[in-house]
Every structure is written in C-alpha cells, then in structure tokens.
Amino acid sequence: MNVAMNLQRQFLSAFGAVAAVVCLLPTATYAADWKPDKRVEIIVPSGPGGGNDRIARLVHKLAQESRLVDPVMAVVNKPGGGATIGYAYLNQHPGDGHYLAITSVTLLADYLTGRATVSHADTTPVAQLFTEYVGIAARLDSRFKTGNDLLGALKSDAASVSAAIATSLGNHNHVALGLVTRAAGGDPRKPRIAVFNSGSESVTAVLGGHVDLVVIPAATALPHVQAGRIRYLGVTSPRRLDGVMADVPTWRELGANAVVSNWRVMLGPKSMTPPQVAYWENVLGRVVQADEWRAMLERDVVTGEFKRSAETREFIKAQYEELKGVLTELGLVKQQ
C-alpha cells in the first residue's frame, strides 16, 4: 500500500511539474518570437540633413531592402528644444518596441544642462552603432587659414570667435570647441555659440558668413569641404583619420590636447521588454554587416564599434560621468 501511495504521489508530482512547464510554454514562445506587427518609427531628434538623420535613413533603407523588418518603417524628424522634443515623443510610447530613436552625446548633455527631463536612465539603450570625431571648419576666405591661427585667437581673445553647432549647448560639438579653447590657453566659456536644429543648418551659417566656424561631426561637412567651400582646421581624434580626412591635423598634433568622440546609439522607450530589445539588437547587428554600411564607415571616416544593449548601457553610464566633469568646467551643469 505504501509503495502504491508513494508511486501515486511521485506520479502526481511529476505530472504537476510537467503541467507547469506546459503552461509556461506559450508565454515563453510568444516572448522569444516578438516581432513588430505595425508601422515602426525611427525618431530623429533634429531636422533633416544632419548626422543623426543621415544614419537613421541608412538604417531604415538597409532594414527594409534586406527584409530584416517586415512592417513599413518610417524616419520621423522631431527637431526642437535641443533634441528634447524627440526624446519626449519617444517616451510617449513606453514599452512599445515599434519606436526607436537615434541619439548621440546630446542625450546626456541636454539632461545635465537642464534642457531636458529625459535622461539615459529613462530610455532603453538598444545598441551602439559607431563612434566618430568632431571637426572644426571655416570658410576658405576666413581669417583662420590653419588650426594654429584659431588657437592663437582663442588664446588672445576667445570672445572674438563665433561658432555654429547643432543641436544644443553642452553637446559633443560644444565640448570639442571648449576643450580646444582651454588647451589653447583661453577661457572655454568665452567663444560665442549659435545653436541650430541640424548639422546642415549650422554649415549654412558658416557658408553665409554669419559665424567664423562650424563645429560638427566630420562627415556632415565633408561634401562642402570636398566642393572647396570650407576647410577643416583640425579634428578631435587621437590620431589622424584615414581617407579624405588624412590631411587634416589633429588638435593634439597642433599642441592642443583635445580629444572628443561622438557616438551614435539606438534607443527604445522606457520599459521595453527583453524580447523587444533582443529583436532590435539582432536587426541592427545585421545592418552593420551590410556592404553599404561598411562603405559608409569608410566614406565618412567613422569607426565601427557595434555594442549590444547591456554593453551600451554601461558605456553610456561612464560617458555621463565624464561629460558631467567637462560641463561643470564650462559652467553648464544644472542636474546633479
């Protein structure tokens, strides 16, 4: 009898365990197989024509042409407020994997300077796409013919120098000029800064003679450099870049130890689920393997450093602390 009862208990216990697993299977399968089932938006928190816009449109093109994503995708520009409008729009869709946004250091800078209430902690980092460096350029007829000309002016009278940047004070462009000014021996708070909604608008400002300089990720101004409209005076890379930027000196070469990198990261809204993140990690991981993407890296002289979600999250945390120190020196930090 005892043997029979023991066998019965073992059977019921085993049956209960199997039943529990079976009950979980539909949920696990559904989660693992998450895919977008409606229109996907890639949000660009700046106007058309800038660096974020160009990259978002390339991601869109490659994902759709290669059928990596079945539903229709759209690039949606949400300029204004130093990118804050775009991030606010992203977070109007918490937990919805159909919305992504492309970002750069601006995300951190806007929060630290008090321009935005959305920080990196309020979003879901999905993947880092690449790293790039910042160029400082002037018109061909500018008083600044070389990087040394600019360093001299920044040392003697930094307030006499004006520059266009996009999209907000305290971002990688502003930090680049501030560090170059400090390295030259000038006050990094003194140069006059004009802020525009996109990189293309800031280039237009220098072409029109409204400012002395444009401070911008190197690739964004390359067509105008190659057309002979403006020239790069220096770049914030640790060593000379390759290709079309090979003749541009680094600020370090010129005696100004200013190295500033920008990065492009894809974010999701807050509260995205792990399966949603995994889906987009895999899609973007395939995008950066495409021949056209590799050609872009070479053409724009940027460094392909793909990172998945967890690594991107830790990277952004470290960047936040570093940027806070620089912006404190520039007198721009409001968030602690």
Image: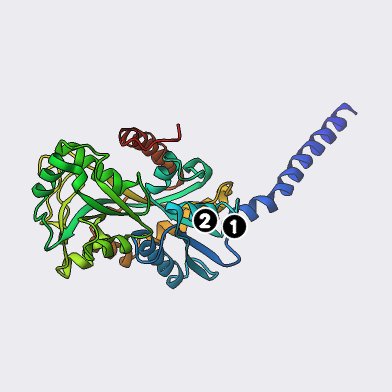
> Which quadrant of the structure image shows residue 257?
top left
Under mark 1, the amino acid is Trp
Foreground residue among 130 and 336: 336
Residue at 42%, 37% in the rendered image: 317
Which percent across, then down, holds residue 237?
Answer: 20, 47
Mark 2 lies on a secondary structure that is: helix
Question: Outermost residue, top direction?
Answer: 2
Which residue has dot 1 on it?
34
For marks 2 and 1, give the CA distance.
7 Å
Neighbours of disc 1 within 10 Å: few (<14), some (14-19), many (20+): some
Which percent across, then down, holds residue 283?
Answer: 46, 59
Under mark 2, the amino acid is Tyr
Q: What numbered label is drawn on residue 239?
A: none
Residue at 21%, 47% in the rendered image: 236
The colour scheme is rainbow
Whether residue 260 is visible to the viewer of this picture, yes or no, is no
Tell me if label 2 and label 1 are in contact, CB under 8 Å.
yes
Q: Left or right: where does residue 205 sit relative to residue 287?
A: left
Q: N-terminal of the two: label 2 or label 1?
A: 1
Q: Left or right: where does residue 254 sit relative to residue 72?
A: left
Which percent across, then down, holds residue 114?
Answer: 45, 41
Residue at 17%, 58% in the rendered image: 138
Foreground residue among 192 and 180: 192
Foreground residue among 331 and 270: 331
Q: What numbered label is drawn on residue 279?
A: 2
